[in-house]
Image: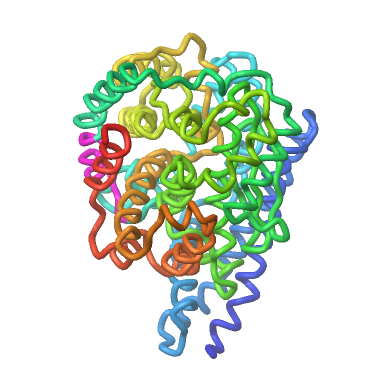
Amino acid sequence: MSQYFEELRPFMDRAMAMMAAKTLFEWDEETLAPEEAGKYTSKTVGVLSEEYQKAVTDARAKELLMLCEKDDTLTDAERAIVREWREELSRLDAIPPQEYRAYAEVLAKASRIWAKAKKENDFASFAPVLKEIIGWQKKFASYEAKEGQKLYDVMLNQYEKGFNMEQLDVFFDLVKREWIPLLKDVLKKQKEEGITDDFLYGDFDEKKQEEIGRFLAEYVGFDFRKGVFATSAHPFTTNLHNHDVRITTHYTDKLDSSLFSVIHETGHAIYEMGIADELTQTPAGQGASMAMHESQSRFFENILGRNVAFWKPVYGKLQETFPDVLGEVSVEQFVKAVCLVKPGLIRTEADELTYCLHVLVRYELEKMLIEDDLDVMELPKLWKEKYKEYLGVEPETDSEGVLQDIHWAGGSFGYFPSYALGSAFGAQMYEAMKKTMDVDTLLEEGKIGEIRDYLRKEIHRYGKMKTSQEILKQMTGEEFNPKYYLQYLKEKYLG
């Protein structure tokens, strides 16, 4: 046992406690807080952020950290914790405390401004705070950037170590080159086959949607002894530690929207719940990266959840819940409907094939905002133009266009590419998994727990002990290769 690590632990516990409290206020803001709470709660969040920064950058903590870095008695988990603490220290130590607190207060009010702007289709009311957030983001990135490093690359690295614009440009060029013609072929095939999803639209009782949502969450692996299920404007997952993980969904006039939102967020939750106890409540007690996190949520949602084998053991429960709608619809018809490719405006409602095109739009706009100083008032126009070019659709309102996502209101610049990378990671993992287990048979027999246990063993338990690329190489025997994602989509949609 390392004496220095044990001395460092109280500083770490204090920092993690501040972060947990801040997370709890952010959760409350999105789910339960009254309308007038925002600007007052933002002060509390600001103070908590300031105290978190103080705990991480404490002078004695710095001394102990340096001693830990020279201590060869540390365990692998402790070394990972020290490494992640060093990275967080380097980031926070460069930011003046008053700036860090001011930024936290801006973010605390921004989500409410965004929600109101989206509801009222009023981008102009959100633009000033968005501009302020971008200014802070660029300033903080400039503090962290190494000589010659682009600001947007700094932001990307916060979510996915080892990926920068140069690498992502190659990936998204593949998406543009292959996905758009593939989309045309798939739409033609669907039209010939006459696939429809009309029966999924209607006025569905929210209590029944919640009932089936809770059922599916638990079936997939959400442990309600360690988790909370709620609603919010934008579905999300957060956690205080691996024994308190929280997911939300929302309800619309499309039945499968909430169903797959729940499965998606449960995928995130399973990851957090599967992180080893020795890592939770430490800087290494999170997913390896956002792309690895998204690989898990989208793996459960799409690769498993939009597979007919997944639904065979549970489709009867869904029919019982909505007998008037699904009573005469076979499981095969249902799965064809929920896999229907239909270019649309909303990323979170997108099918597997067009999803990456939604991410492509956001990636290109983020680069322009950060690297080219794009005026935020140009965003609605450019958003419409890119949607028309890549997906063949054009939003009539900013609410269904540039205002649809909460990410920018939360300062999450560099996050969006993780969604596309995560989908590609998942396809590569799936190809490797099929060599060691019969995935379809396990799903048909309702043994999804065996798949979940495999993922926990190969990915979840490590937290940040390994990078996403290390996990991918260990699990599949290869470096990241997006060909498996393209191959998966072609096999699924063209046969």
User: Among all residues in the image, which is located at the extreme top?
Assistant: 396
Magenta part of the chain: 162-174
Q: Is residue 369 visible?
A: no
Characterize the magenta stretch by its predominant secondary structure: helix
16 lies above or below 210: below
In front: 10, or 26? 26
Which residue appears at 37% of the width and 63% of the height?
437
* Image coords of residue 386 (percent x, y): 33, 19
On screen, residue 136 above or below 50 = above
- Of the pair 59 and 380, the residue shown nearer to us: 380
Q: Nearer the viewer, residue 319 or 431?
A: 319
**Residue at image x 44%, y 63%?**
87
- Give 119 or 107, whichever is nearer the viewer: 119
Q: In the rendered view of the protein, which quadrant contains the C terminus?
A: top left
- The tally of labels here is 0
Horizontal arrangement in the rendering, residue 181 relative to residue 472 (left or right): left
